[in-house]
Image (spheres, rainbow, N blue to C red):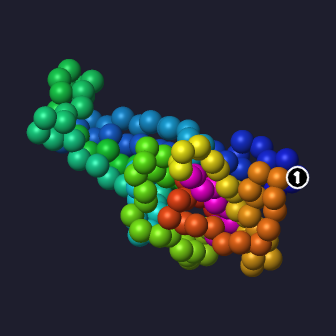
Amino acid sequence: MGLLPDSSDFSIILYKKILCKLCHNFSNLEEPSLFCILKNPSKKEIEEKLKNLEEEKEYKGGNLLYCENCSANREMVMSTFGINIPNIFVFYIGNVLGKRAQGAYNFFYCGDKFELYGVICYYNSGCRHYIAYTLDNAEWMQYNDDHISYSSPDFEHAYMLFYKKT
């Protein structure tokens, strides 16, 4: 990675295969994204997302998808796989509406794929305030407006998590 990252450093391309359970017709989609949104995730959910970047979802009952082959709404299975795994992966944690994440986070170990190197914390105590942290030689640096100091992130207020490939 050079001094200035290009879009391939951040973008993930998700490959989606949608299969009709009735006629077995399938369609493929490519979906680019720059970050992953998780609503108040647990530590395990973040670790699993980074390890796999895969998921399968069933659409049935009142939640059907349109099948072009059948010309009707049908039960479907959508499989998602990561194609392009970026050099830098950003998790946006949906806790800015007054809801905190489920417990305090600590260092997320994700095997040999990614390591946590940056955190942005959000504080809404009357006035909205963001504090950034980066990992520098195994020590956390805090960037609070124009004040820089050594301090560990308050993971309970984590708003964005930045991972890089190892």
Viewport quadrant of the C terminus: bottom right
Depth order, front residue of 1/157: 157
Q: Quadrant of the N terminus?
A: bottom right
The x, y position of residue 28, in whole percent, is 41, 37
* Residue 92 appears in the rendering: no
Q: Is residue 118 above or below residue 3?
A: below
- Provide residue 162's location: percent of width, then percent of height: 64, 58
Q: Residue furthest left?
A: 61
Tag 1's secondary structure?
loop
Residue 120 among magenta residues:
yes
Spot occupied by residue 158 in the image (x, y as percentages of width and height): 55, 59
- Which residue is rendered at x = 43% and y = 57% of the image? 100
Residues drawn in magenta: 115-123
Quadrant hosting residue 152: bottom right
**Between 138 and 34, which is closer to the camera in this rendering?**
138
- For image coordinates 64% across by 50% down, the residue present is 130
- Depth check, front residue: 61 or 26: 61
Q: In this view, does 159 lie to the left or right of 140?
A: left
| Residue count near mark 1 (Cα–Cα under 10 Å), binned few <14, some 14–19, many ≥20 | few
On the question of residue 1 being in view, the answer is: yes
Q: Where is residue 23 in the image (x, y as percent from the top left)?
A: 18, 36
Q: How many labels were placed on the picture? A: 1
68 lies left or right of 84: left
Residue visible at 58% across and 67% down? 154
The amino acid on which the numbered mark 1 sits, given as a three-letter code, is Leu
Quarter of the image holding residue 143? bottom right
Circle 1 residue: 3
